[in-house]
Image: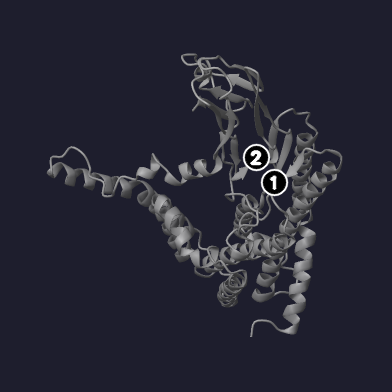
Amino acid sequence: MFMVKEEFANMQNLLRVRFKTQAKPLIWLFIVFALMLLSSLIGTISATLEDISTVHYNIVSDNSVLLMFAMGFGFVAGNIMYRSINAKFSVFPQTNNSRFISWLLFNYSIAIIIALMLLIMYIANYSIIMLMSVFIDNIHLALNVDFGFIVAGFFVYLIYSFLIVAVIELISAMIRKWSYYAIVTFITLFALLIVNIEKAVEQLPRILSFLIDEPSLIFFFLKAAGLWFVITAVSLVINYFTVYHKSQNLILKKRVTIACIIIAVVVTIVTPMILRFSVTIMDNTNNTGMVDIDGDFNSELFYNESYFNLMEEIRIAEEIRIDVSHLPAGIKININGENIDVIKEGTPVIFSSHEITAYVSGVESLENVQGSTLVIQYWQPWYLVNGIEIFHFSNPQVTAYLEGDTLFISYTFDKATVMILPVWSMARQFVIFKDKGILTSHAMGTSVGGNVSVDIFIYIE
């Protein structure tokens, strides 16, 4: 129905021509990726070669999610120029089908090229880190490497990219088919979306949960492939019955443009003002002077229990117990320490989140020893970067022993460069890859927090 032998040949020729005519943009795409790769490799190399005496980390950005959105904007821009681009190919034999399918295949090819470039960037950074770790002992790769996840993530990225292309092409096909009616409809929907952006952001993950929250890799591909097939089939049907060479009514086009502007202004500006005015009038009838917002107070904004539980899990108190029963009562025990800072009562202390040291408190109990056991209780440092505990790689240790009337306390750690190299961050939903240490805590952005110092408390019992 949709493709005969001649159309298939036309589609192949058009696809070949599209790549030839888009050679410069493709070259610029390769240049951008080369610069991104070069910048990433320079950052990785400089981080590993840095002469450090402490613990630090370097995050090699996973650009897959960001580039997926950027790619979507690029496809939107391409569809805006769909008519003008195809006008250049009017000398070639073609039909609606061959023209549209060649355009689809071109966009899918771009998505594949971007996915391959992202994979190359990851492999290049990983190879550099592994090569340098052979010569430098203190380099640690924070995330485990799972080749099954790398392959699966590549295809997950592709299916998401293909779905983005399919949805954009469906909307574009509808606009080309029903032109002004579709434009007005989508402008209205877009304006409503902007007005209700908070609810949209909240509801969109729920609407797409059947796909983005699917825990089974197999079912994900089945659902995604089925959805992609349906969207593409509908686009092909709409395109098949679209006439592209209708005469353009310039007066009607101007009227539609003005109507779209009016709709956008009314929906995004006037409507919220009317609703707000209505709420104020209703509120004044109650003489309350303020609007009652329905909903309970969310205490999690001020107290996140899971966060404090996490702190307790990370910072488990450890103890060193030393027998001092042989010392005479009332004796004073002196402190001699390495990498420690003694805090005495009433002395102001400035704590630093970057200075790696041990803060010792409770030393007043050593001024006049009354007891048989000296207890040194301490909490190891913790520093979470995207859910990764950096100090696990530095082997921090507190040691203490008594020699005569002197307590020797030492805090030591190994210098370490922790390399965080994530890949395919959007493919984090699958059970098969859970708890393997191959993903950061979230797909985008950076979260950093913790305490790099050891807290030591001394008392006598």
Q: Which residue is mark 2?
A: 390
Circle nearer the N terminus (2, 1): 1
Image x and y of residue 286, in percent: 13, 44
Q: Which mark is residue 142?
A: 1
Please state if 355 lies on the left or on the right of 329 as rendered.
right
The front one of 236 and 307 is: 307
* Circles 2 and 1 in contact, beta carbons < 8 Å: yes
The front one of 416 and 68 is: 416
Please state if 418 lies on the left or on the right of 219 as rendered.
right
Q: Which mark is residue 433?
A: none
As shown in the figure, which amino acid type bears the numbered disc 2?
Ile
Q: Residues within 10 Å of mark 1 (few under 14, many from 20)?
A: many
Please state if 275 lies on the left or on the right of 268 as rendered.
left
Please state if 93 lies on the left or on the right of 240 as rendered.
right
The front one of 192 and 395 is: 395
In the picture as drawn, the residue positioned furthest to the right comes out as 135
**Which of the 4 image quadrants contains residue 303?**
top left
As shown in the figure, which amino acid type bears the numbered disc 1?
Ala
Image x and y of residue 149, in percent: 69, 61
Residue 260 in sight from this viewpoint: no
Which residue does the image show at 51% across and 25% down from the upper left? 459
